[in-house]
Image (spheres, rainbow, N blue to C red):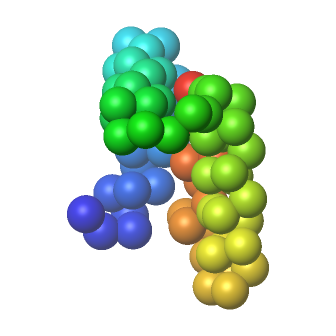
Amino acid sequence: MSKKQAQEFIEELQKSAALRKKVSEASEQIIKVAKDSGYKVTREEISLALKKHWCEKAKEKEDVLSRVFSEAPGF
């Protein structure tokens, strides 16, 4: 996916409740995979860890698209 398309997806995510619901459901699957893999984590802990990771990577790249999913529903 190109950066332009990624940005378009984020813009649509902000507008579409249906799309936000799908992303939220996807985040539930990430939590399930983590737990099924033996990690004792909560949604909030995964959310904080991802936000920290994305912010660190964004600082390295100075690229807003590398951190935009920290605003995604569910995380």
Q: Is residue 18 above or below residue 63?
A: above
Q: Is residue 58 visible?
A: yes
Residue 8 location in percent, x, y?
Answer: 41, 49
Looking at the image, which residue is at 43% across and 23% down? Answer: 28
From this viewpoint, which residue is outermost toward the bottom? 60
From this viewpoint, which residue is outermost toward the front? 38
Quadrant showing the N terminus: bottom left
Q: Toward which corner of the image does residue 23 lie, by quadrant?
A: top left
Residue 31 location in percent, x, y?
Answer: 46, 30
Looking at the image, which residue is at 63% across and 75% down? Answer: 57
Q: How many marks?
A: 0
Looking at the image, which residue is at 61% across and 27% down? Answer: 43
Q: Toward which corner of the image does residue 65 lie, by quadrant?
A: bottom right
Quadrant showing the C terminus: top right
- Does 29 sit left or right of 64 as displayed? left
Q: Toward which corner of the image does residue 58 lie, by quadrant?
A: bottom right
Residue 36 location in percent, x, y?
Answer: 35, 31
Q: Is residue 56 above or below residue 8?
A: below
Q: Is residue 16 visible?
A: no
- Does 49 sit left or right of 11 as displayed? right
Looking at the image, which residue is at 70% across and 30% down? Answer: 44
Residue 67 location in percent, x, y?
Answer: 62, 60
